[in-house]
Amino acid sequence: MTTFDARKNKFSMLTDVIYMNLGDSQKHDGEFLGRPIEGKLDVGLQAWVLNLIGGYNLIDTGKNQFDLAAGARYLNLTVDTTVKLNDNKRKFSDGGNTWDGVVGIKGRHNYPDGYYFN
């Protein structure tokens, strides 16, 4: 994950990129109607999220700043699943991507000694 934020006069820009590659695996051995069963499930998720947001300052008192923000968010997801039951193995994969609009308020409260709260 990475974030970049810039400001010039009353205008601001924010972008962040998030990448995830997650997965898990479960095994189970047992018996069904007197026959041994060996099962395994593997699931993986890969995702990219990209935010591109611009802002305009509405309030700036020195101690508080509030911006109106708007932009776009890109989301790309892929899910891979593998199911194994004894000697039978099936693989499934699905995914997609989308763009969405983003609207909000971005703010900051400055405390003494250089601390602040976004």
Image: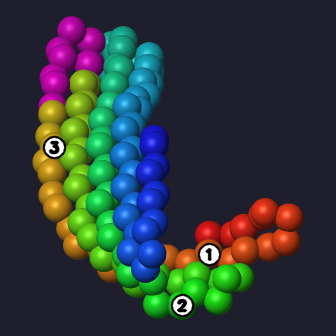
Place of residue 35 in the rendered image (x, y in percent of width and height, measured from the top left):
33, 13
Q: Which residue is mark 2?
A: 59
Residue type for callout 3: Gly
Mark 2 lies on a secondary structure that is strand
Work out whether 73 lies above or below 16.
below
Camera-near label (3 vs 2) is 2
Q: Which residue is mark 3?
A: 95
Camera-near label (1 vs 3) is 1
Place of residue 95 in the rendered image (x, y in percent of width and height, measured from the top left):
16, 43
**Do callouts 1 and 2 mark residues in contact (Cβ within 8 Å)?**
no
Residue type for callout 2: Ile
Place of residue 71 in the rendered image (x, y in percent of width and height, measured from the top left):
27, 70
Q: Nearer the viewer, residue 62 or 88?
A: 62
Magenta residues (range): 84-92
Q: Nearer the viewer, residue 79 or 110?
A: 110
Kindly report the distance in space between the C-alpha atoms of the residues bearing marks 1 and 3: 37 Å
Query: Residue 86: within the magenta?
Result: yes
Which badge, 1 or 2, is on the more N-terminal residue?
Answer: 2
- At 45% from the left and 66% from the top, the residue drawn is 7
Kindly report the distance in space between the C-alpha atoms of the residues bearing marks 3 and 2: 41 Å
